[in-house]
Amino acid sequence: MLSILLTILKYIFLTVMWIIVVLLITLLVLLCIILFVPIKYKVKASYFDDIFVSRSRVTWLFNIINISIAQDSNKTDIITRIFGFRLRKKVNNKETKEELKRNIKEKEEAYKETIKEEVREEVKRDLHIDEEVDTKYIKKECKLEKDIDNKSKVKAEKLKKKKVKKQKKPNKDLSLWEQIREKINKGKAFISDEKNKSAIKKIYNSIKRIFKKLAPNNIKLYLQIGTGDPALTGYVLGILSFLYIIKSKDINLEGNFDEKIIKGTIDIKGKIYLVTIVIEAIKLLIDKNVRRLVLSKNV
């Protein structure tokens, strides 16, 4: 009897072990797929005369997962497909939202006016007066009007509080390029700190290696940019010059040192291997200077 029980326990143990092994192998295979199967992407975009248009596509796992994004100045359409079946379509139409807000506001105003007219007619009907209304009832009417507008006043106060909070936030009144310049100055002060130089150099080298390995296989770019400040324009062009490290390139960068302007087109194709990012992230986490920089409260 004991031998039979031991045999049953043995087979149960072996079965459980086999299940665990199969699960581990399955997880390992899935991990390898995630890390080594590339994510492919294509992006086409243009910006001229304050009109932005783009078409993007991201595919993974031999096109089993497919995400298409179409965007212009007014709306963004996102379509996700798995095995060719559409899962979700997201539309974000800014014009529609603004129109809805205007319609709601107009309806609220019309509703208030309707109530006011009904109050007037009711007072006249009760008193059988066609033109003149007693001062007492005029006061009542005014009181009713105040009650009607009460909710609108509360909403207005809330909006004022929100505006005050926004005004208290720094740099909101600055132009885009002034905000960029301020951030650049803060970045320079941060980089000049001796304690951070080693970690920043390590991070920079890792990002550079990642970009070289994950950079687009093909890129066509035309960009004309001007900030209104010749020095800042030159600085921005210097930052963008890293694009020239891409092997397959058709890049044309132009600086406009006389006026504020930005326009151009871009067409890129590439692949992203997650294993490259994971390896570089592990290298950074091992470095004690990088850990100190990441955990620092002053960052």
Image (cartoon, rainbow, N blue to C red):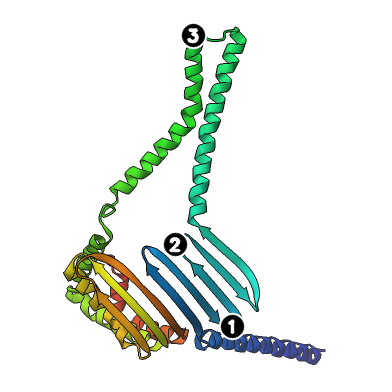
Q: Is residue 44 left or right of residue 296?
A: right
Quarter that holds the C terminus: bottom left
Given the image, on which type of amino acid does mark 3 rest?
Lys
Amino acid type indicated by mark 1: Asn
Rendered position, 1 above or below 132: below
Gap between marks 2 and 3, in whole Å?
A: 56 Å
Which of marks 1 and 3 precedes in the sequence? 1
**In front here: 257 or 42?**
257
Q: Label 3: which residue?
A: 136
Could you tell me residue 149's position as x and y percent? 47, 28
Amino acid type, label 2? Ser
- Drawn side of residue 184 relative to residue 214, left or right: left
Circle number at residue 63 = 1
**CB under 8 Å between discs 2 and 3:** no
Label 3 sits on a secondary structure element that is helix
Neighbours of disc 3 within 10 Å: few (<14), some (14-19), many (20+): few
On residue 73, the disc is 2
**Whole-percent x and y of residue 194?**
17, 76
